[in-house]
């Protein structure tokens, strides 16, 4: 089992952290979480949070349709 992502929890399965050069975004579903990096100069934190929440809503729909027996734990 991988460690829990660091940073601020911004959605059910999404976390945001900031380094000197980039935003680190952990995003996924109950089975898998992936790390993405975005340079600080490309997006603001608010833009990333809005986008991640939209993507998480779409992923939740897809996931619950594909795996109806698995619970998506909401925070």
Image (cartoon, grey):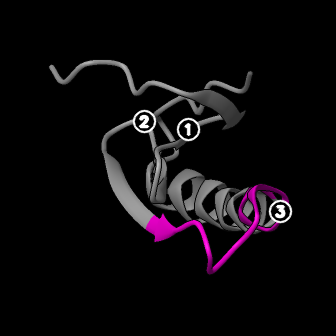
Residue assigned mark 1: 13
Structural crowding at the residue carrying mark 1, measured as other residues with C-alpha within 10 Å and reported as few (<14), some (14–19) or many (≥20): many
Whole-percent x and y of residue 62?
57, 65
Read off the magenta span.
Answer: 38-49
Q: Are circles 1 and 2 on residues that touch, CB within 8 Å?
A: yes
Residue pictured at 32% horizontal, 52% vertical: 34
Residue assigned mark 2: 30
Q: Is residue 39 in the magenta section?
A: yes
Inter-mark Cα distance, 3 to 2: 21 Å
Helix, strand or loop for disc 2: loop
Comparing 62 with 18, the one in front is 18
Q: Give the number of the mark in front: 1 or 2.
A: 1
Comparing 47 with 65, the one in front is 47
Inter-mark Cα distance, 1 to 2: 7 Å
Residue at the limit of the structure toward the bottom, as seen here: 42
Structural crowding at the residue carrying mark 2, measured as other residues with C-alpha within 10 Å and reported as few (<14), some (14–19) or many (≥20): few
Helix, strand or loop for disc 3: helix
């Amino acid at each position: 089992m991988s460690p829990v992502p660091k940073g601020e929890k911004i959605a059910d399965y999404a976390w945001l952290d900031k380094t000197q050069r980039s935003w680190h975004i952990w995003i996924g579903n109950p089975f898998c979480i992936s790390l993405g990096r975005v340079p600080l100069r490309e997006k603001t934190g608010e833009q990333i949070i809005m986008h991640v929440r939209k993507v998480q809503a779409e992923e939740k729909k897809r996931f619950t349709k594909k795996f109806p027996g698995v619970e998506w734990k909401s925070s």
